[in-house]
Image (cartoon, rainbow, N blue to C red):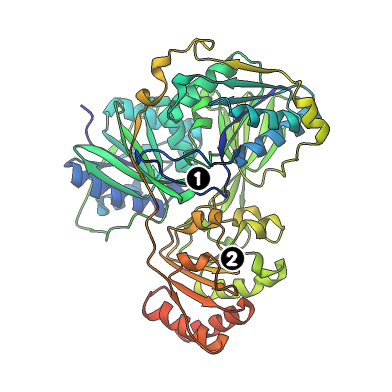
């Protein structure tokens, strides 16, 4: 069973986000870049399926050269080979263009399952996975917390929590799954894993290599245009509840929640 | 030229979901700002009797796609039907909820139509005939204001519980129109084989009106009982911070934050949560935030409307007792 995992490199969750002087971008200088946490669940699930069914796990990343580190991390976890789509013309691409480039790279690879994270924790868009599935003409199964591939490797049954319930969905393969927290506990790369990863194949591709027209990518081709990026709205300074004892404070808080905030 | 605002209704088991009223109400406001008609799109099986109600919330027309294969949401069938309707009618704006269903549907639909999409927005406006959407990015550490270029319809989803629901006006009525449904069964590649209801019928955090959340300060899984008692009293759902979930005290589905759920309740009570940036990112659109924490320097107090410095094991049970006096 051959599996592809798409990887995005994102700022670590502890990162403070600073807005650039153009007020349309963020400052990336001091950012610690990591693998998108939701993509880690995809890598882990792919490795578990490979351990069960055999086959190969290929990880595909897109972005500047620094994304190589994220691909190497997945190789160190146990993926077999990597592909980096890197091209200056991709800078500033929106989700649909990104999905188009990833789909073009995946199209030529023989695969049964594709994993992406349910969303990137940077733009929080959650479109790329569905976009890849659309461009490849395969089903998408989004926000999945459980994956069972049939013994014959021809179909998959997944669990998708929706508000208040969970749906168990059966799909033919190939299919694309977007991973949600709860799917598994991703492994850490072992030291031998890290050593081995250095020798695993990592291929770089440009848009031209993928037969794509550069004018359909990048800032200029964006269909969603960023007008401004601003800090979150400030919350008015909070009120610290005074009181001698916990009981007094609780009484005052209950009163404020009832009378002032009208929240209870 | 593309004309009209469309609001995609969401139903489950034949009942309209709350997000539907939010989207139709917001769609009405936007249609007025753009000087256009509002059409609600309703998919389901034997669902037509629900169409009139959408008129009360402001829809001028309701397009109803009624088919047994549309009874429950599936990506394949819903995308196929809405995509065809969109191509045939050329709306200017397509709105839906950023619910689990709406996120799945909108993403696939936008790729299929080859149009831009603004996900999980917290505000909409009309500027020079275009939809302008505001959406939190980096889980709310920044906000992006976006619009669309050479992309029709202009598509966006709204974060649940953010858009206000208009007072229904029973004197308003919508023209109800049967929409054609042509589905190729061989193109429906997925099927729902089982449906498991959550235990206890707890309201999902993304839809909860009130949330009582516990973090590392809870010290262990048993201690959540005091939060559950308070939550039961005020009709809240119980949430948790990442550290509490990673410690195994609470299920993954309860996590609020950048790698968990992003929530916007009317009331968020954070107990023993210091306020790591990735947690704050997930709850900062809550309307009223209360923090209860021993550490007076905890960052959560900077974000809260009401703070209590104290031991949550004393304060929370006392608060539960005090609130009873008002109920």
Tell me the residue at 75%/31% (across/down): A76
| Residue placed furthest toward the right | A192
Regarding mark 1 in the picture, which secondary structure is present there?
Answer: helix
Please name the residue that numbered disc 1 is placed on: B100
Q: Quadrant of residue A237?
A: bottom left
Image quarter hosting the N terminus of chain B:
top left
Mark 1 Cα shell of 10 Å, populated few (<14), some (14-19), many (≥20): some
**Residue A199 screen position, x and y as percent:** 76, 20
> Residue B157 falls in which quadrant of the image?
top left
Query: How far apart, in angstroms, are the residues tagged by discs 2 and 1?
Result: 27 Å
Question: Camera-side residue: B85 or B216?
Answer: B216
Image x and y of residue B20, in percent: 37, 50
Earlier sequence position, callout 2 versus callout 1: 1
Q: Nearer the viewer, residue B78 or A121?
A: A121
Disc tally is 2
Q: Secondary structure at mark 2?
A: loop
Label 2: how many Cα within 10 Å (few below 14, some 14–19, many 20+): many
- Rendered residue at 26%/33% (across/down): B92
Please indicate whether residue B193 sits to the left or right of residue A86 in the image.
Answer: right
**Chain label for disc 1:** B
Determine which residue is flagged by label 2: B273
Left/right placement of residue B70 relative to residue B273 reads left
Instruction: Mark yes or no: residue A91 visible.
Output: yes
Where residue B224 appears, x then y in whole percent? 65, 70
| Rendered image: mark on residue A182 | none
* Residue plotted at (51% across, 38% down): A29
Comparing marks 2 and 1, which lies closer to the viewer? Answer: 2
């Amino acid at each position: 069973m051959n599996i592809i995992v798409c990887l995005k490199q994102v700022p670590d969750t502890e990162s403070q986000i600073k807005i650039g002087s153009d007020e349309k971008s963020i400052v990336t200088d001091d950012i610690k870049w990591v693998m998108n946490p939701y993509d880690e669940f995809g890598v882990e699930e792919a490795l578990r399926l490979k351990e069960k069914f055999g086959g190969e796990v290929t990880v595909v990343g897109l972005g500047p050269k620094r994304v190589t580190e994220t691909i190497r991390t997945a190789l160190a976890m146990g993926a077999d080979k990597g592909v980096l789509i890197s091209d200056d013309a991709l800078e500033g691409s929106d989700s649909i263009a990104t999905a188009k480039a990833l789909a073009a790279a995946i199209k030529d690879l023989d695969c049964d399952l594709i994993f992406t994270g349910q969303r990137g924790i940077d733009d929080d868009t959650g479109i790329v996975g569905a976009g890849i599935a659309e461009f490849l003409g395969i089903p998408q199964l989004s926000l999945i917390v459980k994956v069972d591939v049939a013994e014959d490797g021809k179909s998959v049954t997944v669990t998708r929590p929706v508000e208040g319930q969970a749906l168990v969905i059966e799909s033919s393969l190939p299919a694309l799954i977007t991973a949600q927290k709860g799917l598994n506990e991703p492994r850490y790369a072992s030291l031998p894993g890290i050593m081995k990863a250095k020798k695993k194949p990592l291929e770089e591709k440009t848009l031209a290599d993928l037969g794509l027209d550069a004018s359909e990518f990048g800032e200029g081709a964006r269909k969603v245009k960023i007008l401004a990026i601003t800090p979150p709205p400030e919350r008015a300074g909070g009120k610290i509840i005074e009181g001698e004892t916990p009981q007094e404070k609780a009484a005052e808080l209950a009163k404020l929640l009832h009378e002032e905030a009208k929240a209870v | 030229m593309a004309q009209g605002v469309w609001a995609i209704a969401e139903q489950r088991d034949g009942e309209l979901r709350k997000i539907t009223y939010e989207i139709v109400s917001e769609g009405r406001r936007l249609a007025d700002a753009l000087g256009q008609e509002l059409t609600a799109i309703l998919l389901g099986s034997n669902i037509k009797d629900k169409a009139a109600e959408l008129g009360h919330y402001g829809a001028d027309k309701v397009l109803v796609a009624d088919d047994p294969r549309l009874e429950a949401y599936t990506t394949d069938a819903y995308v196929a039907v809405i995509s065809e309707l969109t191509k045939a009618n050329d709306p200017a704006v397509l709105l839906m909820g950023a619910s689990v269903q709406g996120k799945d549907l909108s993403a696939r639909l936008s790729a299929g139509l080859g149009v831009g999409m603004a996900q999980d927005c917290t505000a909409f406006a009309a500027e020079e005939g275009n939809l302008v959407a505001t959406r939190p990015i980096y889980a709310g550490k920044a906000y992006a204001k976006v619009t669309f270029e050479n992309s029709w319809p202009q598509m966006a989803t709204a974060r649940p519980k953010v858009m206000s629901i208009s007072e229904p006006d029973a004197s308003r009525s919508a023209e109800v129109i049967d929409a054609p449904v042509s589905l190729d069964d061989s193109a429906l590649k997925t099927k729902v084989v089982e449906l498991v209801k959550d235990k206890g019928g707890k309201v999902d955090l993304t839809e909860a009106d009130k949330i009582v959340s516990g973090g590392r300060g809870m010290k262990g899984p048993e201690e959540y009982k005091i939060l559950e008692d308070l939550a039961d009293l005020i009709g809240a759902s119980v949430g948790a911070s990442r550290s509490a979930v990673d410690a195994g005290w609470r299920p993954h589905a309860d996590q609020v934050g950048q790698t968990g759920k992003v929530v916007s309740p009317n009331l968020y009570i954070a107990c023993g949560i210091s306020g790591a940036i990735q947690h704050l990112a997930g709850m900062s659109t809550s309307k009223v935030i209360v923090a209860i924490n021993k550490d007076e320097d905890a960052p959560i107090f900077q974000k809260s409307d009401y703070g209590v410095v104290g031991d949550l094991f004393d304060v929370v049970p006392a608060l539960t007792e005090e609130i009873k006096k008002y109920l």
